[in-house]
Image (cartoon, rainbow, N blue to C red):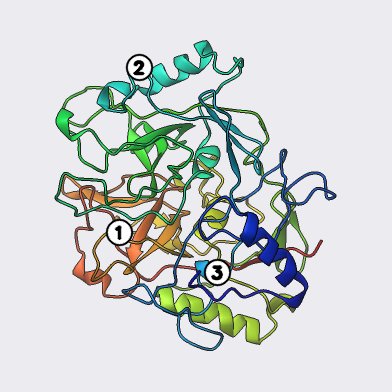
Amino acid sequence: MKAIIRMTKSVIVLAFALILISGCDGASSTISDSSDDDSNPGNATSGYAVIDTGQLYCYDNTNELSICPVEDEPFYGQDNQYVRLPCDYSDNGDGTVTDNVTGLMWQKSPDTDGDGDIDAADKLTYDEALAGAETLTLAGYSDWRLPTIKELYSLIDFSGVDPSGFEGTDTSGLIPFIDTRYFDFAYGDTAAGERIIDAQYASSNLYVDDNAGSLLFGVNFADGRIKGYGLTIPGSGTEKTFYIIYVRGNTNYGDNSFVDNGDGTIIDRTTKMMWSKDDCGEGLTWEEALDWVEVKNGTHFLGYSDWRMPNVKELQSIVDYTRSPGTTGSAAIDPLFSTTSIINEAGQTDFPFFWSSTTHANWTETSGGSAGAYVAFGRAMGYMDGTWTDVHGVGAQRSDPKTGDPKDYPTGHGPQGDAIRIFNYVRLVRDADT
């Protein structure tokens, strides 16, 4: 493991043991128990266990680093240096996979038609996906459901590499954002006219703001993002289809239980994480954001010196998908939190993108680490048809260049003109004392 893992002396022995038994590459843990049963740490079969991202390496503004930075060096405090609950899957040999940490049981394959391969013919519309859950009996169970966006995102693995910009047809050298030792996966069906990155999996979460159109949140395990996808394909009226895997068990997964401590901190009792009530109050580059956290630690901020910039799965865990600027006049987060307001690209009062400590690695060797993953707690803006619009929905997870000038992207970037801000915000997190 290339990372130098920051941990206290009291957990070194435990973390080493977890490295030995970890079922996922790069995923050891300084345990933060999310179980309702405190005598059973790490086996959160009820409640909300946030699984480690699996990020294998450290990065600077552009590249993978051969050695992770140490304290007081630039880029210290990123994802790989703070690891949490390792994933722990069991292939049940009957078409299902059990996540032994979250208590969720998953359908192993999106091979919906059962013909032995995964292609465009396996994809379903949103309505078909809902109906399929009602009729599915698998491994003796008939209580399958279409996963929520938080359940689905629990499977994402940031040892994956984004193939965006890849123009070849051979995907054998690409690495998806899901553990293919347990789950069957295929990139988009190019023989059917799809792009390689067309591996969007549907969740059950529709975007609450209808002003953005009917959007369904999904996880793309090809390129490592959450986006809101239209239920119809623009210009054709044809219903969009998605890969589907169903889930059962732990119906409480993704439920938060926040407590305002009255001292500038908020605890989520289900994930056992403590958050700062306020954000940083200004936009920062990724490197500046990491440095800002360390400065705060140096001042014993809010009584603690072990704050970190959250990894992207920790950050997504506090999104409230029932809220949005257009429906509740707020960021997509519990109102116990304070969130700085901004003016977005369309001139609307809005809320920021928030940096995570997770690098969104790209397949290119020369600039593979130049983007950082963020979560949009306000509108996920994009430039489409000559105007700025909420193209992917509040609660999307996308990525931004770690450095540069936003003015270089007057019409955004990519097929949906994703807004490029570069100067994003930060909210602190630490493991709650238990």
Q: Secondary structure at mark 1?
A: loop
Q: CA distance from mark 2 to mark 1?
A: 43 Å
- Mark nearest the camera among 2 and 1 is 2
Q: Earlier in the sequence, mark 2 or mark 3?
A: 2
Q: Earlier in the sequence, mark 2 or mark 1?
A: 2
Rendered-image quadrant of the C terminus: bottom right
Label 2 close to label 1 by CB (< 8 Å): no
Q: CA distance from mark 3 to mark 1?
A: 26 Å
Q: Amino acid at mark 3?
A: Met
Q: Nearer the viewer, residue 360 or 427?
A: 360
Q: Is residue 337 above or below residue 242?
A: below
Q: Is residue 355 above or below residue 116?
A: below
- Label 1 belongs to which residue? 345
List x then y, in percent, for residue 131.
Answer: 46, 14
The residue positioned 26% from the left and 46% from the top of the image is 172
Q: Secondary structure at mark 2?
A: loop
The residue positioned 40% from the left and 28% from the top of the image is 110
Q: Is residue 176 above or below residue 422?
A: above
- Label 3 belongs to which residue? 309
Q: Earlier in the sequence, mark 3 or mark 1?
A: 3
On the rendered structure, is 34 left or right of 357?
right
- Label 2 belongs to which residue? 113
- Mark nearest the camera among 3 and 1 is 3
For residue 38, which numbered disc appears in the image? none
On the rendered structure, is 157 left or right of 197?
right
List x then y, in percent, for residue 183.
Answer: 45, 36
Q: Residues within 10 Å of mark 1 (few under 14, many from 20)?
A: many
Q: CA distance from mark 2 to mark 3?
A: 42 Å
